[in-house]
Image: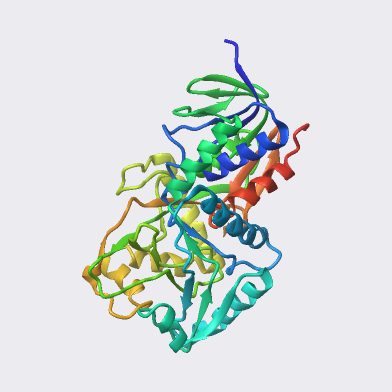
Amino acid sequence: MTADACDFLVIGAGVIGVSVARELRRRHHARILVVEKESAPGRHASGRNSGVLHAGVYYKAGTLKARLCVEGNRRMREYCRLKGIPVNDYGKVIVARSAAELPVLRELYARAQANGVHANLIDGQALRELEPCAKTVDQALQVKDTAVVNPQRIMEALVADAVQEGVEFRFSCLWQGRDGSEVAKTSQGRVAYGHLVNCAGLFADQVAHGFGVGSCYRILPFRGQFYRLRPESQVQVRGNIYPVPDLRNPFLGVHFTHRPEGEVTVGPSALPLLGREQYRGFAGANAQDSLAMIRYLIRLIGRNRDHFRSIAWKEIAKLSHTGFYREAEGLCIGLRKDDLLPGKEPGIRAQLVNIRTAELSSDFVIEQGPRSTHVLNAVSPAFTSSAPFAEYVVDTMKVDA
């Protein structure tokens, strides 16, 4: 059977796949085809995240995340203004729950300064003026550049722009592997390509392994469950209230986010899963993923790199409504258990794990293969960073390899 043909084949129509496709089209004016197994774009992490545009306060100066996040934040805000997409740009505060967290709070301030982020250390009185219900010990960090958007609105606009620019999309089209060199097998037939870009998110490792790339990496999915703050709650949130994170691991903890539509979300949790699309209960779990995930978790807990055991225990505690409430009530004054209502559909974080070292990958990971580029780790702040990140991916591509 004759294969369809394109110059660049992009797997995955999340925010990274769409952004990379647009950048390829701008640079090469070639035929760009995006294949997506779902019936619409952004059905997973790109459309299910909190919508927070991160400022770049968490990342060490000089890392890829730090550089791309700061620039991505600026450009995403500008994109929203151009498209008329609502933005809550009130900023956020990071609060300390104990005196032991103050050194980390000051380290975040130092990182913010090094990365060019607009942030200030403030006292309790200034905190009350910004977020009257937030509570802290001694000091808090105000991060002015943090904003919140509706990620689904962003995805709709990005795809519409991509189509107008000449990018082609093929939905309900499942990647099924390689058919020799430079030909892809899909559920809608064979596609010949000049270069393939793997932006498959939760399945990026499996696609990469088919090219002999990233053999030391596996995706470990974590489900992020959110609650909604009861509208009648006495807790009022203007922007975002975040805890001081444990900088040894990539999770930021439960936080309060005021979305542009007015709803306040509380979360997320970060529960390791037995399936890459296990959104509710055990639906989506499968034997192959379950065995692999259990094996990786045992190694992660046993090696305890990045203090993974403490992560595991905290997340187990948040499985119950009471445990989740205890985590959230440390950030604000007046929160009641019945203020936490069932939230929106959860999202799943495609966290990359190095199975040789039993470590969670904290920075973006991109590897090259035969006529292919593989985006293996594009977790938060990838949504914020998507425009400059796409440029970086295209810069790294060895198109003639």
- Can see residue 219? yes
Residue at the image point whose x is 36% and y is 71% from the top: 237
Q: Who's the residue at 57% across and 50% down the image?
A: 378
Q: Residue at x 40, y 65 (%)?
A: 257
In the displayed structure, 346 sits above or below 247; it is above
Q: Nearer the viewer, residue 253 or 81?
A: 81
Is residue 351 visible in the rendered image? The answer is no
Q: Quadrant of residue 29?
A: top right
Front residue of 128/266: it is 128
285 on left or right of 218:
left
> Looking at this rendering, what residue extends furthest in the top direction?
1
Q: In which image quadrant can residue 27 be found?
A: top right
Rendering coords of residue 213 (x, y %): 66, 40
Q: Residue furthest right?
A: 400
Front-lying residue, 323 or 137: 137
Residue 204: x, y in percent? 55, 41
The quadrant in which the C terminus is found is: top right
Residue 109's spot in the image, x, y percent? 60, 77
How many marks the image carries: the answer is: 0
Q: Residue drawn 62% across and 41% down?
A: 20
